[in-house]
Image (spheres, rainbow, N blue to C red):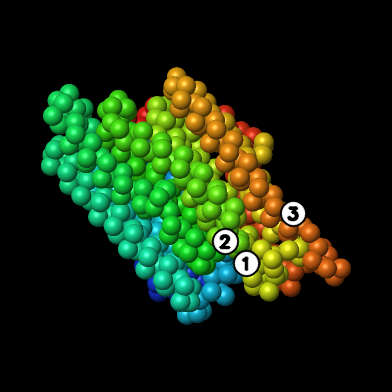
Amino acid sequence: MEIIKNIPLFTIVLSLFSGVLCFMLKGKAAKRYTVCYEGVLIILVSLVLYYTLRTRSSFTYVMGEFPAPWGNEIRAGVLEALIALAFLIIMFSSVIGGYRFILTDMDESKVNLYYTLVNLMTAALMALVWTNDIFTGYVFLEILTLTSCGILIVREIGRTTLAAVRYMILNLLGSGLFLLGVVLLYDLTGHLLMVPMQQTITELARDPKIVPVLTMAIGIITIGLCIKSGLFPFHFWMPDTYGWASPTSAAILSSLVSKAYIFLLIKIYYRVVGSWVMQAMPIRDILFVLGIGGIIIGSVQAMHANNLNRMVAFSSAAQVGYIFMGLGLGGHYGYTAAIFHILAHAVTKSMLFLTTPRLAAVSDESLLFSNLQGSGLRDRHAGIFFTVGALSMIGIPVFAGFSSKIQFGIAAISTHSDWRMIIVMLALAVSSMLNALYFIRFIIRIYTQKDENDRTVPMGRKSVPSYLVSMGLLTAGNLMLGLFSGVIVNLIRQGLGMFG
């Protein structure tokens, strides 16, 4: 076996080992080690992406001596490698971009524990991307939930404790529903590996008496992951969770954790259930309706927020609605649009959450709109990077958000359903208008002088190189998705072709 086929498993094992190692290191050493090893993982996963593109095929790594359908497998194709690479780059950027606020938000003696949690979270993210076993997905789903609560609660103020408790309760509810659905599928099929499970489900779906049971099992799994990812109406935990978390934690939770849950759901739809069986289930229509609801309600709530972090958090709820709208549209184009938006939202939202505390730092540590006036003039770098992220959220051409909305429009047209197409086009238009209202209003505010002394002056603490590198990577990713969307879309479609 070529050594490159060992890399997916190695990314998981190395991340687990790194979590243990950082527990024994001091804070600064743990940070340096985490940055270095995340960089190594980026290089290794890039090699996997290159290999799958060159061979035009996926590969499976069988763990232990038991082959399918009894053993455990890791599977890598173009889509898995692309998602893993994007997740690692965003994790790397979030870690180096938010380091200053990690030091201010927690006791110095606990910084190494934070990086321990980050590395364990990276292991869980990689496992959810690579695994070909649905129960292994559940195991790392729980690890991701626990580490998410850990990085949320490290900011030792009362509101983060309350937010962490609420987040854990809802996520454990989602995990319990997911496990119940897995048990039902195992009882029906006798398999836990995704491909053998799909073969059995395809045969069972020919019996009309079994279809309702299959629908119930997949529906329970869907509800569980919808709760965990924050789809409307399960999005009410987002403002406190993202709003009171440390900036690095908010960037990771919004950009990576919720997207990993959705990617696992896509794997289940595509690789466990099968596309033609999913088309026959009413789940797709329900997701479409809830996705549209999330887009509109999330945007309206963001428009009425008076706190910057809450506005960005409610915006996240709307963006999750876009992804589920794509899943509701179904088909090759619908899934392509949903996956493209996972990437677009991930690079953009992490940029926004890493920028908002810098605007607050030059505004008496306040996130209230009234106090943030002129903050873009007081911290030019933060103002520029926030503007880039905001324009992407609105859907201005050359940015990722614009290309993403184009993909949803193409997916709506491809359904050959007039009412779906009309609803999607109206939702895209209304949400873009609402996004423009609250983001442009805020951009104008941060570039409006508060008084005569409020001019373009450097902030008290200058932008450190690591922050500029972080924002540079995220901005480059945003522009790449916007200007070279055709390349990314082709990669996603090629990956979906290997996915089944």
Estimate the x, y position of residue 392 in percent, counting from the top left.
63, 44
- Dot 2, crowdedness within 10 Å: few (<14), some or many (≥20)? many
Task: Note whether 276 is above or below 369 in the view shown.
Answer: above
Q: Where is residue 469 in the image (x, y as percent from the top left)?
A: 64, 56
Residue 152 relative to residue 434: left or right: left
Say above or below: 161 vs 241.
Answer: below
Q: Residues within 10 Å of mark 1 (few under 14, many from 20)?
A: many
Where is residue 404, by image quadrant? top right
Q: In this view, does 5 lie above or below 158?
A: above
Marks 1 and 2 in Cβ contact (< 8 Å): yes
Give SS at disc 2. helix
Give the spatial CA distance, label 1 vs label 3: 16 Å
Q: What numbered label is drawn on residue 367? A: 1
Residue placed at 25% from the left, 51% from the top? 177
Q: Residue 309 carries which label?
A: 2
Most foreground residue, 139 or 245: 245
From mark 1 to mark 2, how far is it between C-alphas? 7 Å
User: Residue visible at 21% across and 46% down?
Assistant: 182
Question: Does residue 457 lie above or below 184 as drawn?
Answer: below
Q: In which quarter of the image is the N terminus?
A: top left
Question: What is the x, y in percent for residue 485?
Answer: 58, 33
Return the residue at label 3.
444
Q: Earlier in the sequence, mark 1 or mark 2?
A: 2
Q: What element carries label 1?
A: loop
User: Is disc 3 placed on a helix, strand or loop?
Assistant: helix
Q: Is residue 179 left or right of residue 17?
A: left
Residue drawn at point x = 38 percent, y = 62 percent:
167
Give the CA separation, mark 2 to mark 3.
17 Å
- Residue type at tag 3: Ile
Q: Do the residues labelled 2 and 3 touch (CB within 8 Å)?
A: no
Residue at horizontal 27%, vertical 41%?
219
Task: Tell me, yes or no, if residue 473 can be seen here.
Answer: no
